[in-house]
Image (cartoon, helix red, strand yellow):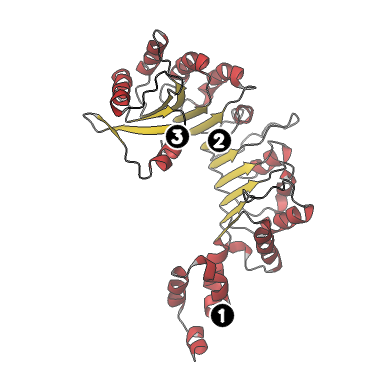
Amino acid sequence: MSNITTMTLPPEACHRIVHWTRRCDLTALCLTSKSLQKSAEIRLYEVIMSGDINVIFRACESIVSQERLGPYVRSFYLYLNARRTQTELPTRFWNMVQKALWKMRCLDVLYIDDPARANSWILNDIPKIPFQLREANFRLPWNRHVIKFLESQNKLRQFHISGGIDEDAPQFEDGSLPDLCTFDGHLASAMHLLSLPCCLRHLRIPLDRSTNKQLLDFIPKLSTLSRTLRSLNIIHIPEELSVEAIKLISFVCPDLHYVGIIPLPMTFPHRSMIHDALLAMHNLRDLEIDVSRWSPLPNTGSLQRMLATELHTYCPSIEHIVLRTGSNRTLWYFDGNEWNIRSENGQHLLVDGLWKNR
């Protein structure tokens, strides 16, 4: 009797049952009745995310063998469980992932973490790729496969890539990535993007020893983005370059709303040079600074409030200041009268996304 009742449930009832079902129970719900199967499958396959390659492989296998499942997938996350020591996955696995991607015509978000950095070829058959992504996050090398794939993605708005760049990586074709507004990747990759007439609003670049010396040559090239760029997050700026870097930033991109992560010198006159640069940035709302090399560290609330007040004096438009002291980050906000610490609840999520919010 219960099976008959379930089979005749109206679609609205099925949607509500599926909505309140735990994700781990959706597979069992698919087997309950035909009425519930479709709604349960839509939710089950809407987001595919697992660090277990066996789970990912079985999901891809189902998508390849059953045509109705591919269009349900909106987000696909492929990564290895942190406990897994294997760095290379078999070709059979990557072939199945590639075939499954060809079925996902409604895919919006794609995350691929390849520990071997050797399988970007799964993106190379452009005519068979049916989707237009909104967001992509790749742990893959910046090579011809990735670039050709990106050239086909006209709706991509956010892109993060953490692999190195191949020497033979080609330049983009004119007109590529027309909607890209957020990029997070190495300096060499950002240089490739600057060859495009794109409208980037948010840019994050992690530096390392090999790219530190290129920073001061790179910043003037941001003049091509000065009309649209609102956030610039440069990670690991050496303290000896901080003064020259912020001076160049304030000259090339004076309309930024967010700047970070600037190592703030403890002593004058170098600290006053940072102040001079801030004077030119009339639209700055968020500033992230690093005082990890100060001795003693300004760990107390009163010292940090004094420091925030000092910086605000030279740039009155600032609303948020993030202070980094070693591994600790403290978010201060100005309420119109004084500086206050943001409550711990959700602080790190807000800090991590601050550069993308302007």
Question: Please, is residue 131 above or below residue 222 in the view?
Answer: below
Q: Which residue is mark 3?
A: 355
Give how far across and how far down residue 300 sits, in percent. Answer: 32, 27
Label 3 CA crowd tier, 10 Å (few <14, some 14–19, many 20+):
many
Q: Secondary structure at mark 3?
A: helix
Foreground residue among 276 and 103? 276
Badges 2 and 1: C-beta atoms under 8 Å apart? Answer: no
> Along the horizontal axis of the image, is 293 left or right of 100?
left
What numbered label is drawn on residue 184? 2
Of the residues under marks 2 and 1, which one precedes in the sequence? 1
In contact (CB < 8 Å): disc 3 and disc 2:
no
Q: CA distance from mark 3 to mark 1?
A: 46 Å
Q: Residue at 61%, 30% (x, y): give it.
A: 186
3D distance between C-alphas at marks 2 and 1? 44 Å
Count residues near mark 2 (Cα–Cα under 10 Å), then give few for <14, some for 14-19, many for 20+.
many
Q: Amino acid at mark 3?
A: Trp
What amino acid is found at the position of numbered circle 1 in the picture? Lys
Residue 228: tell me if it is visible. Answer: no
Q: Secondary structure at mark 2?
A: strand
Q: Residue at x 60, y 62 (%)?
A: 71
User: On screen, 63 above or below 223?
Assistant: below
Sequence-first tag of 3 and 1 = 1
Disc 1 on helix, strand or loop?
helix
**331 sits left or right of 239 in the view:** left
In the depicted view, which residue is nearer to us: 346 or 8? 346
Quadrant where the C terminus is found in the figure: top left
Q: Residue at x 50, y 17 (%)?
A: 239
Amino acid type for the residue under numbered disc 2? Asp
Residue at far front of view? 296
List the residue tagged with mark 1.
Answer: 34
Residue 261 position within the rendered picture, expressed as x and y whole percent measured from the top left: 46, 26
Distance CA(mark 3)–CA(mark 2): 11 Å
